Amino acid sequence: MKLYNSIGPNPRTVRMFAAEKGIELPKVELDLMAGENRQPAHMARNPSGTTPALELDNGTILAEITAICEYLDEIKPGTSLIGKTPEERAETRMWTRRIDLNIVETMSNGFRYGDGFKLFEKRVHCIPQAADDLKQIAQEKLAWLDGQMAGKTYVCGARLSLADILLFAFVDFFQGFGQPLNPALKNIGAWYTRMKARPSAAA
């Protein structure tokens, strides 16, 4: 296998997940700033033009971080980061979906339409007037999640899961791009500190 990698929270999610699973992934670096991911070679691999993409040994290409992570989870024995029972897997997917839709997407589009507008204006349909509202929605959803995290070590309780890795990669990235964590969110703040201390955070 090899991972088509780049800067940004999407590839980092996969790198962290693989590190937690103990999977070594050879990497091919793509220059997002130069738009290499939108060139014909990568578009042939992944017609969405995004990173990461995982090339399997048989040449199959997997894209989308949740699909890649679930694949990696299934092929490597040991502790599952999706869940070892149907209930745990459903719980992980529920929280991953909530985080992806309500926090990750709003933070990402708030960045693309705002701080990152010059980079993205010719790559995706940008709505600059929506940037501040999207950032605010993300903060509101983080505040809601902070309430849900009371008494929990991780999003799914005592067990680390894909939901945590996804959330951490994006929250950590956007701290440096105009969307810092609200210090009033004590549960999320404590969770963030725990995640930052994990060896996989350096992946």
Image: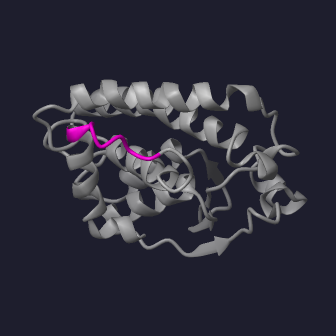
Which residue appears at 62% of the width and 36% of the height?
A: 110
Q: Main secondary structure of the magenta part?
A: loop
How many labels sit on residues? 0
Which residue appears at 26% of the width and 31% of the height?
A: 146
Give 148 or 15, whichever is nearer the viewer: 148
Image coloring type: one colour
Question: Can residue 45 be found in the magenta stretch?
Answer: no
Q: Position of residue 74 (x, y in %)?
A: 37, 50
Asked if residue 179 lies left or right of residue 188, the reply is right
Residue 36, visible in the rendered structure: yes
Q: Is residue 195 above or below residue 188?
A: below
Q: Quadrant of the C terminus?
A: bottom left
Q: Quadrant of the N terminus?
A: bottom right
- Please provide the residue range marked out in magenta: 180-186
Question: Can residue 184 be found in the magenta stretch?
Answer: yes
Residue that protrudes farthest toward the left in the picture: 151
Q: Position of residue 67 (x, y in %)?
A: 52, 43
Q: Which quadrant of the figure has residue 6?
A: bottom right
Q: Is residue 24 above or below residue 103?
A: below
Q: Position of residue 160 (x, y in %)?
A: 23, 48
Give 46 or 165, whichever is nearer the viewer: 165
Q: Is residue 173 above or below residue 142?
A: below
Give 184 or 50, whichever is nearer the viewer: 184
Asked if residue 119 lies left or right of residue 99, the reply is right
Q: Which quadrant of the figure has residue 79?
A: bottom left
